[in-house]
Amino acid sequence: MAFGVYLHIPFCRHRCDYCAFATWTDRHHLADAYLAACRRQIQEAAEAGTLGRAGVTSVFVGGGTPSLVSADDLVDVLAQIPLAPGAEVTVECNPDDIDRARVDTYAAGGVTRLSIGVQSMVPEVLRSLGREHDPANVTRAADAARSVGVPFNIDLVYGATGETMEQWRRTLEAAVDLGPSHVSAYALTVESGTPLAADPARHPDDDTQADEYELATELLGAAGYEWYEISNWARPGHECRHNRLYWSGGEYLAVGCAAHGHVGGRRYWNHRTPERYIAAVEGGTSAESGSEILDVTESRVELLQLSIRTREGVAADEVSDRVVDQLQGLVERRGDRVVLTRKGRFLANEVAIRLG
Ligand SMILES: C[S@@+](CC[C@H](N)C(=O)[O-])C[C@H]1O[C@@H](n2cnc3c(N)ncnc32)[C@H](O)[C@@H]1O
Ligand code: SF4
């Protein structure tokens, strides 16, 4: 039975203009206490027997910027997790932080996969996103991962103000040339409270983003990456197991501040700030700040809406024939499944809402 752990690292050097994730640029001094609290939370979960009966099958260390904390300290935290044989362990990284020594430490500590936040290979586009990493470091990061033999994902974002189709093509081609095993390409979204939200002149255009998605589909497919979820492509066998756990309604423990978990039919989330999280764990109280139990109908709808976005789609007997007929052209029956058509992928959110 699959069981995951999501570990959140809430520190960044700089906040990108589009990002609303729980991360801080002025709290690095908390890193030691924070990682100690994460270690303790995992040890307590392991002692309580809540980390999956057969061990943890996937771990995702996300952020924030996990590569900003010491690699040795991070692998010490990971060492507390009782892993199932062959478990997938991913660490999200900023290209500026990745060199051979760091990848060696990660690999020796059981990390099986990196996810590198590239976003764009074009300096003007990175500037337009308010992103500060040095594009030259992307090549160094990919070289380091390849030389140690750790497969890596590349995260890309499309729809920055002023990004031309030619620049997006250059980004996709350069990304493929780096030899990733997996590529995630996300439509830039406007998140409230961000500098991007406050500047309507920089908001992305839907039609341009649809054209950019089409180009990604074409180029990544031609380069041997198989589409398997709206924003994700992988070489066969390199699909991200941890994300699949989310999309299939699986169970996972939340470690760290602002992390969300799903265990025993209950969704919960931890204290949002690192200070409150550290205080709760050090004080021997729960790291959770809230939870909810979805009823059967809510769980079914949520699962349908996540699954329809994947290559496998949903079981045909889960959705009404009338709705499938109404969505003709956007979804199709394939054996006993209903899946998105290529056109349907552009309108996945609308399709998901109709199916629910
Ligand atoms: C939260 S970041 C964490 C990893 C690392 N800090 C980085 O930026 O690469 C994970 C990914 O989320 C995506 N992301 C964050 N905010 C986004 C937004 N507003 N629209 C689209 N993608 C976004 C980016 O592609 C980013 O690589
Ligand atoms: S996109 Fe990544 S690097 Fe930028 S602020 Fe968000 S978490 Fe930090």
Image (tube, rainbow, N blue to C red):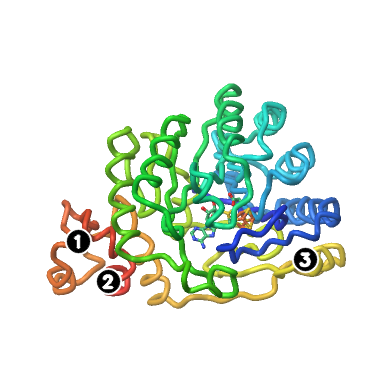
Whether ligand 2 has any atom under 8 Å from the Cβ at mark 3 is answered as no
Q: Amino acid at mark 3?
A: Tyr
Chain-order first, disc 3 or disc 2:
3
Cβ–Cβ under 8 Å for marks 1 and 2: yes
> Where does label 3 land, which residue?
277
Q: Which mark is residue 331?
A: 1
* Residue 224 screen position, x and y as percent: 32, 33
Position of residue 282 relative to residue 298, above or below, is above
Asked whether 265 or 132 is in front, the reply is 132
What amino acid type is highlighted by mark number 1?
A: Val
Sequence-earlier tag: 3 or 1 = 3
Q: Which residue is mark 2?
A: 355
Q: CA distance from mark 3 to mark 2?
A: 38 Å
Image point (61%, 75%), residue name: 291
Tell which quarter ligand 1 is in: bottom right
Residue 301 horizontal/vertical position (percent): 36, 72
Mark 3 closeness class: few <14, some 14–19, many ≥20 residues within 10 Å:
many
Q: Position of residue 234 (x, y in %)?
A: 39, 39
Gap between marks 1 and 2 measured at Cα: 10 Å
Question: Could you say which quadrant of the image residue 188 lies in?
Answer: bottom left
Judge left or right: residue 186 versus residue 105: left
State the residue lying farthest toward the top.
Answer: 147
